[in-house]
Image: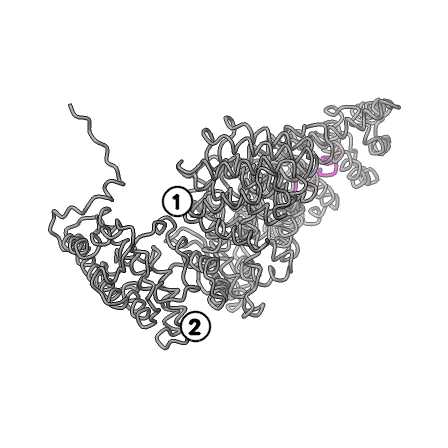
Amino acid sequence: METEKKVNIKEVLLKEPEFVRGSDLDLFFEKLNDELIAKLKAANKNQDLPNIYQLLGFHNNEEFVTKIIDYFTQLHQITLSTQKQLSEEGKDILPISLHDIKFVDELIKLVIVHGIDANLPQTVRIPTEQKQLNAYKESNITNSIPKDTVPNFKVLETVIRSFYTIFKPGSSSSIAKDDYLRKVLLNGPLYSNVYIGLVFLHLQNNSFASLDLLNEFEKLQETYSLFVIYTLYIQTIKEHSLKAFFLNKLALLPLERSNGVISLVDFLLGVRDDDQIKMENLNRVSQTLLSKPSKLSNTEYLTKLFPQIIEALQSTNRPILITSMNQVILDFFNKNKLIVKDFLLKPVLGVFFNDPVKEHSVKELNDTINVLVSLSKTTSIELAHFITNYKENHQFYLNLWIYALFLKNSHIKKPLRYDNNGLKDSSYYEIILSLIKSYLNITGDFGALNTIYLNLANYQHADWKYQIDLETNLAYIVVDKQQDVKEDLRITTESDTDKLTKVTKVFQEMDDGIDLFIEFLKLLNIDDVTTNTFLNRLSSWIRTSKNDIYTENKTNTDTNLINNENSIFILQDLKFLEKVNDNFKSDFVKKPGAILNVVDELLDYISTAKDEGTDLTNIPNREIATGGDSDDDSEDESDGENQEDLLKDVSNDNTSSTFNILIDLLLTVLDNTNVMVLLKYKDTLINIKSKLAKDETKSERLGKISNQIDGILKSKPTGNSNNKLIDSIKYDEDNEKLDNIMINLSDPLVPIEVHGLHELCKLIQTGTEVITLSKVVDLQFQFLRNSDPFLYLNVIKNLNLLLRLNKEKTLPLILDRYNNIKKTKLDDILKIGEVLINFIQELNELFVGKIANMIIESCIHKIRRHDTLDTRIRMSAMSILGVCLQVNAIGISDKIPDILDCAFKILQLETTEKNSFLMRRSSIHIIHDLIYNSGFQLFPEQFSPEKTRTLLEYVKSNDNDGLVCETTRQLLEIIVTDQ
């Protein structure tokens, strides 16, 4: 049985065409091969290449180029016809086969070399190595321009006109729109070469190459490709006038195209080539966008730039783009805060606050929320404060809360949501709550919770409101005209039914608001915040209730009571305190100091009750603080009258009840807190004991509490015990911080995780004993593996922070992972390389000694493992060595022989392996970095200037990679210039 032969793509491409179908394209390529391709191949076998025009029977360049254009015109028409036929037959295949496409490539090369280059001055041409790299390496008749050829601008004009006809979109038919050959030519090297010819003619004031034609020609190409093309021109073309022209084009491109900023980010960060981005590239984006083109005023520039930044921020599913835009915004903010306020926040928050009041569509509102979600990923606390304080009195958080309430009440679902655990279903209001949480965690402005609490049942704004679009099931903003109608009709009275409905609605909205607030506290998951909120509301309840406002209204009707704002807040406080107690009781003992301070303060507010003849010691306790049920308040009571009964009952015995609540809180702390910790609050305990002393004879319970406080106060630590107490208190405080950090690190929201990682670094900076530096580094590395750039770029910053804090201890921990190829993933090794590069650049001239040797030896060890390591790891190590030479070559002079040994051996020995050209390119850069930094002064004897030049000359002449040859040639020019 014969073994089946494997198909080799290279063999397929090298075979002669197999014309078996007899289609128009087959006949065309058969004719092309006979008349042109076969003759060129035969001529290439001769040692002395003949004149290509004479060989093929043409008198000059113009006749030859005309024939090539004619071939292209025929090919274009036949290809369109073939596409139409395939479409009618319902066949979804390419009109030109993989085998035949190589003949198209040959035609393209002939046009570029003989139609463009032969008719341009040498200084205007794109260098051969840059046109298509390896495709032009071999010297053959196709690439050889006869020496007697004189540039003819008329021929150049003919080429441009002919291919502009092919490049521009055809008719409105689907076949013309999906022109296969047009796509091939636009995406290949032909467009960039034809365009350079057009620009040259334009700068020569050629009447054909008008500015309008130039603009139309530019519109044919996508924005990303123009960034690539303009950069190629600037880097390779020698003609200064053309370089200046394209520098100006490159500066204006992000503003002239609607997707200019997004394409710039994709280009500079290499998003289309690599999922992982580098810090230096992120900084390049920011530097580019902060550099205003000279032809524009500041206002013109910012007016054009920021709408694109806002649009980019709406793309919440593109984390790399969001990370980049946040960096740009932060740099603008550090430069001038008013720029961010006027050009970013004003249009975005104008919709969010609806100022001025007008209607906004579903898209406008949804885009605005997306921008706020993206901005919550900023790394700057100051910028986050700036955003949330755009309006005073926590209006930012209040608007988010009102929106969340509306969405929950409307039962709006958002089908899909991503977090660290993958894809899941969620309600839209949960996303808004998460947004509030993100901003609160970044800013630490938890005082906003009080503003939210005072508006728990606030479902809409004064003169505008949200409504649901039935088609999209999403919210939009409308102007509330209902109040205006009532005023116009002078409607001032309500029926009893309306009043009762209003009362019932108020109580229902109160319950809904409290439930959502409790849900938010659970989502926030910060013990300190929960406890402080509880204590603040307890204090408010006691202070307000003490005034006994309700007793004045006992004879009023139920519906009049609802108009008393204080009565509503007291009932709200009562319901809230019970809910908090039910859900968070165990958290209270974690804040003994706060509870003792509140008890101490509030005992003063109820002490006047004795003077009015109220016995504080014999009233039954409602046990709100300890989780007991209230006889007068039931979850099932939604009827307005029952709610009012509850309100009256609470007013009657409030003073005695609040006293017992405070006593229960006091006992909770005394019974569940270590004596050594309680001694920290010695003065507060003395105050509380003195305030209870007048009543302790009337109550056995108060007497026991007084004795318990006495026992605590007599436990007086001295000397070493006192130091242990201080250490213990600090340890407990740090441990509490660590607990909160670990909660943040397990949060599904990326900004919260990033915040936790920052706080972890701040904690270790204090010299804490609750966690070791090694453990902190471990935790950072766990998140370095994450694919979200916002997360892993912040981890890189944190690791550099830890290196600055203690490089002697941190660097070995990082290098352990960098060197452990078996356990550390490829992407993580590359990210660690970024950490090391940033560290080296920060040290600058201090990069010497043991620290430098550790890094260099790790890199050299990786580079020498050419048989076992991925090329990308070795490339990363080469990049690190290059940075070492750039920042302080003289400081690491003892390691230069080893570094050069790696570079020279790569150039000499690694010439055949797959992707070895990448290592040869990096080797040339290593040699360049050293020569550029210090000439040949630091070169050891075994790598003398003569040996170096000899090797470079050999590489330039013999390497099979065009870019290696070009960079080597440039390096040799530098060497000659320096000498």
Question: Can residue 641 be spotted in the picture?
Answer: no
Q: Is residue 505 above or below residue 768?
A: below
Judged left or right of residue 918, residue 499 is: right
Query: Residue 52 at what x, y percent from top left?
Result: 26, 59
Disc 2 designates what residue? 203
Q: Which residue is mark 1?
A: 960
Q: Are marks 1 and 2 in contact (CB under 8 Å)?
A: no
Q: What amino acid is labelled 1 in the image? A: Asn
Location of residue 759 (image quadrant): top right
Left or right side of 712 for 134: left
Quarter of the picture containing the N terminus is top left
Secondary structure at numbered mark 1: loop
Local crowd size for mark 1, using a 10 Å CA cut-off: few (<14), some (14–19), many (≥20): some
Considering the whole magenta stretch, tell me its main secondary structure: helix
- Percent x, y for residue 7? 23, 36
Label 2 sits on what residue type?
Answer: Leu
Q: Looking at the image, which residue is at 27% across and 41% down?
A: 10
- What stretch of residues is rendered in magenta? 646-660
736 relative to 411, above or below: above
Q: CA distance from mark 1 to mark 2?
A: 36 Å
Count of numbered circles in the view: 2
* Residue at the spot 48% in from the left edge and 44% down from the top edge: 921
* Residue 789 or residue 188, whichever sits in front: 188
**382 or 8: nearer the eye?**
8
Magenta stretch contains residue 873 = no
Q: How is the image coloured?
A: one colour
Pointer 1 or 2: first along the chain: 2
Residue 783 locus on image (x, y percent): 55, 35
* Residue furthest out toward the right: 719
